[in-house]
Amino acid sequence: MTPDTLEGRKEILALALDAAREAGRRVHLGFRKHPVVEHKGAIDLVTSYDRESERYLRERLGAAAPFAIVGEEEGGASAKGPEGATWYVDPIDGTTNFCHGHPFYCVSIGLFVGSEPVLGAVVAPALGLEWTGVVGLGATRNGEPCTVSQVATLGDALLATGFPYDRRTSRENNFDAFVAIKKQVQAVRRCGSAAIDLCFVGDGTYDGYWERKLRPWDLAAGAAIVRAAGGRVSTYGGEHEGLLGGDLVATNSRFHDALVLAIAQAP
């Protein structure tokens, strides 16, 4: 399998979706079963389901498409050089939701080639939803083609956001931006899974999304799906490069610059 051609990317996406489905099936066995919870940080949680899901994904992806793999629980290094392909795997995005029996969690698998998001597969088993996307080939929701919304202005937009794990201690906690932007838009939602938020931008549910301090496995699949669906993804500065740096803005592209400006102007 090679990510150098669109046909190759189709094959890789089929692998990623099948792996995400199986990992999602395994994770869902623990949903609302009161899994044992450990703390990686004050509010950063992990369960045996996270670890088992990642082990499965590493084995499955590594056997069929042995690119570099970076995952939330076991880490890893990105492939070197501009042509390097890297899997970014989140075995449960939204672990806090999962631990509390909240249905907004998912398995997220994204592939970058160098600094570019190429494809993504996201499966949310409790919601009965799955999304895929290949840049240049389009995006799907539950197997049907999907695209970003047509909302043209920031004032009419339904947005999503989130808050970093160090929000108790860091001034860069998104609180001020949340208040400022909420006053300028139709509404803002906060579901607790960056991957699902990005997929909702890709399928037109949300018109845009922003968040600080994301990790590569949080955003890789969703960023590819948004782009595949016709949207725009950038850094907080509006740049196309540097998406893995963690500060991300995603929109249907129609008011992207306005949202970037609103974030910059927030207190």
Image: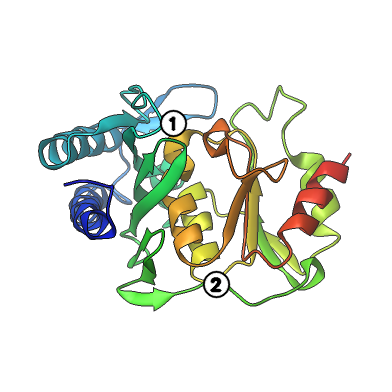
Residue appearing at x 38%, y 76% in the figure: 145
Q: Amino acid at mark 1?
A: Leu
Can residue 193 be seen?
no
Callout 1: few (<14), some (14-19), or many (20+) C-alpha neighbours within 10 Å?
Answer: some
Q: Is residue 214 above or below residue 15?
A: above
Q: Secondary structure at mark 1?
A: strand
Which label number is shown at residue 45? 1
Which label number is shown at residue 119? none
Q: Amino acid at mark 2?
A: Gly
Q: Earlier in the sequence, mark 2 or mark 1?
A: 1
Q: Position of residue 70 (x, y in %)?
A: 34, 30
In which quadrant of the rendered view does residue 104 lie? bottom left
Whether residue 96 sits left or right of residue 120 in the image: it is right
Whether residue 255 sits left or right of residue 134 in the image: it is right
Q: Position of residue 59 (x, y in %)?
A: 14, 34
Residue appearing at x 37%, y 40% in the figure: 113
Q: Is residue 38 above or below residue 1?
A: above
Q: Secondary structure at mark 2?
A: loop
Can residue 238 be seen?
yes
Frontmost residue, 62 versus 213: 62
Frontmost residue, 109 versus 96: 109
Q: Which residue is mark 2?
A: 204
Between marks 2 and 1 in the image, the one whose residue lies nearer the viewer? 2
Q: How many tags in the picture?
A: 2
* Alpha-carbon span between mark 2 and mark 1: 30 Å
Residue appearing at x 76%, y 50% in the figure: 260
